[in-house]
Image (cartoon, rainbow, N blue to C red):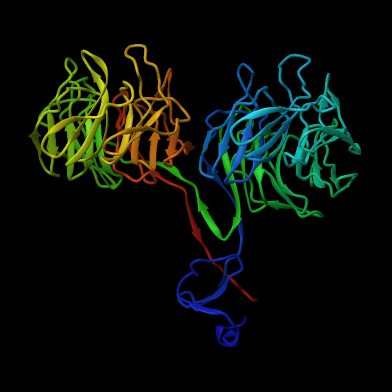
């Protein structure tokens, strides 16, 4: 094996740490590890954030950081979907609905210029369509129809140079027809050599691959298209159908397939190579991206799923975001207040297992909960602002009354402060102990509120109202950069809200809409990086997490268990959240760590 002394005459960097910034192919001598290293790609799948709607028979387009999943079906009963979701590499957000529900259709293109064609649109015969649609990043518009009606067809290419091949015709016949799209019209081209449906199709209009499928039987046949003719390619190692695919003719990926297999294969234009397996076997998923960065979303396992997995072949090792169990609260509670960060949090008040309004206060150090001095006034659903050593609890409910009482915590004791002007519960609160905001909530009467109050460390003062009444909402941020979202706008039969509003210390302006309407969820972060997790979306309690980037909401990894009326470390950065307690007066704690990437050098061994 060569030594560094022998190589020193070459232009190899001598470093005590990885190059920063690094690039693929970098080579250096690691003086700390006494080894020659390089940045070499490593292939791996990691958990991504789930779709907001579970679905199978769904198709993908775009890239890992600008992806698209359109149409599909859910069961039971079988429901054909028009919903489109967009992927930013971290989470899914709502896109524009398709004009016609498509499932097992052909789809290709990018997130801002996609094409969908054919597919099944009904559970009863005749169920196929010749319809095609184009997507511009927000809206689907009708395009000209294909010549051959079919479902389970393969799609490749772009919106202005698209390709549809194979498929299934009524009542179950297999199709060999190929059609090209020029951005306006479809034209018949030379047929596949083997008629089949449910094959994996990837590439561009002049260099495409059509792999596997059902004849019947299920086949391993591979054909390549050069823009004119189909010719035989190297067969798959085993017969397979309903798999997902993305990439190019010389750098393609085929993943999953019938039987919900986890198998993943790479194609270099000549040979198939086994790649790292999926964590969850599936078929009929939306797949898109490149051979170095792709994703799979949804599919059947065999029931419809919302699960997403990301594929990366890079020297950057991706660690998926996750919620993990923390140590339990000493006393279970729901509707409790919370503040602080994940490693220094405070939980106070709420309902106890006996149904009493709690004065209990508990402190979390990132490992365990400890009882500390109690509130002076028992309450639930109060304002919760600040950090572990400078917290504020104001208003709330005692079970019989909406209270205005305000208390400050200094890390040891609670002390009475000046009352809030309007006693309330379920308001959206954010800021610090000396610069806090409480927006909306419930009082009785008048009921649901729009009024907003600010606290300066001494007194509460009325400021600009919310644009509309709301209670049971979520909030985070600072006095001059706050965010309020979700909640309800009416009382006993609540109208769920998905809207959000941003506060600049004076005025409220509309922010992006949530993916899911909800109330009673967890919350933390800043106006430009907020997190909402769990909560209630009538009629169900949910585990779904969403993240806000200052413009739009997108899904993130879900809580391990659905929960609502839980406490939050409200001052925590969106990437390290904390959830504790919840209905029905539970003790569970969950900690969130966001997705990370780290450059990892590989040792070069000359033996």
Query: Where is residue 48 shown, x and y percent of the image?
Result: 53, 42
Occupied quadrant, residue 390: top left
**Residue 34 seen by the camera:** yes
Residue 293 % position (x, y) = 62, 50
Query: Left or right: where does residue 206 sit relative to residue 258?
Result: right
Residue 92: x and y in percent read 53, 37
Quadrant in which residue 143 is drawn: top right
Q: Nearer the viewer, residue 10 or 212?
A: 10
Q: Is residue 336 visible?
A: no
Residue at horizontal 25%, vertical 36%? Answer: 338
Query: In this image, 177 relative to 582: left or right?
Result: right
Q: Is residue 548 above or below residue 565?
A: below
Relative to residue 83, is residue 555 depicted above or below? below
Q: Quadrant of the C terminus?
A: bottom right
Quadrant for the N terminus in the image: bottom right
- Does residue 221 appear to the left or right of 505 in the view shown? right
Residue 135: x percent and y percent?
A: 65, 33
């Amino acid at each position: 094996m060569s030594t560094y002394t022998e190589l020193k005459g070459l232009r190899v960097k001598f470093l005590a740490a990885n190059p920063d910034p690094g690039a693929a192919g970098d080579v250096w001598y690691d003086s700390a590890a006494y080894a020659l290293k390089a940045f070499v790609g490593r292939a791996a799948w990691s958990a991504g954030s789930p779709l907001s709607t579970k679905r199978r028979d769904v198709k993908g387009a775009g890239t890992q950081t600008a992806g698209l999943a359109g149409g599909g079906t859910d069961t039971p009963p079988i429901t054909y979907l028009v919903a489109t979701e967009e992927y930013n590499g971290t989470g899914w957000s709502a896109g524009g609905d398709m004009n016609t529900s498509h499932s097992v259709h052909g789809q290709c293109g990018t997130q801002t210029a996609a094409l969908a064609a054919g597919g099944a649109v009904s559970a009863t015969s005749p169920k196929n369509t010749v319809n095609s649609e184009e997507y511009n990043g927000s809206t689907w518009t009708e395009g000209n129809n294909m010549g051959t009606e079919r479902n389970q067809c393969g799609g490749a290419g772009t919106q202005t140079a698209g390709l549809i091949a194979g498929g299934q015709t009524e009542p179950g016949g297999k199709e060999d027809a190929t059609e090209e799209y020029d951005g306006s019209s479809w034209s018949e081209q030379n047929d596949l050599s083997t008629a089949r449906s449910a094959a994996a199709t990837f590439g561009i209009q002049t260099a495409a691959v059509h792999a596997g499928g059902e004849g019947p039987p299920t086949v391993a046949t591979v054909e390549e298209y050069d823009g004119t003719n189909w010719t035989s390619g190297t067969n798959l190692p085993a017969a397979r159908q309903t798999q997902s695919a993305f990439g190019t003719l010389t750098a393609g990926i085929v993943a999953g397939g019938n039987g919900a297999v986890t198998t993943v294969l790479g194609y270099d234009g000549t040979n198939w190579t086994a790649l790292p397996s999926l964590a969850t076997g599936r078929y009929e998923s939306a797949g898109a991206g490149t051979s170095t960065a792709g994703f799979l979303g949804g599919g059947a396992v065999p029931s419809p799923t919302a699960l997403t997995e990301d594929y990366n072949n890079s020297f950057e090792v991706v660690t998926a975001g996750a919620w993990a169990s923390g140590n339990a609260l000493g006393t279970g509670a729901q509707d409790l207040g919370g503040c602080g960060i994940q490693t220094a949090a405070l939980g106070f008040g709420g309902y106890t297992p006996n149904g009493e309004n709690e004065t209990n206060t508990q402190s979390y150090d990132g490992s365990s909960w400890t009882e500390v001095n109690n509130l002076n006034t028992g309450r639930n659903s109060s304002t919760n602002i600040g950090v572990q050593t400078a917290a504020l609890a104001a208003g709330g409910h005692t079970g019989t009354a909406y209270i205005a009482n305000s208390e400050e915590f200094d890390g040891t004791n609670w002390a009475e402060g000046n009352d809030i002007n309007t006693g309330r519960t379920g308001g959206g609160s954010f800021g610090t102990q000396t610069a806090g905001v409480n927006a909306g909530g419930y009082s009785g009467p008048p009921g649901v509120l729009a009024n907003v109050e600010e606290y300066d460390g001494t007194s509460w003062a009325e400021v600009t109202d919310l644009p509309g009444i709301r209670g049971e909402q979520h909030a985070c941020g600072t006095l001059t950069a706050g965010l309020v979202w979700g909640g309800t706008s009416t009382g006993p039969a609540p109208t769920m809200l998905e809207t959000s509003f941003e506060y600049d210390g004076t005025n409220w302006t509309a922010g992006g809409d949530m993916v899911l309407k909800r109330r009673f969820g967890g919350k933390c972060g800043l106006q430009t990086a907020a997190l909402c997790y769990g909560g209630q979306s009538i009629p169900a309690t949910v585990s779904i997490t969403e993240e806000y980037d200052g413009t739009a909401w997108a899904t993130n990894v879900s809580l391990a268990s659905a929960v609502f009326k839980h406490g939050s470390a409200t001052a925590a950065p969106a990437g390290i959240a904390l959830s504790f307690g919840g209905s029905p007066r539970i003790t569970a704690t969950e900690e969130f760590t966001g997705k990370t990437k780290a450059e990892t050098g590989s040792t070069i061994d000359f033996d």
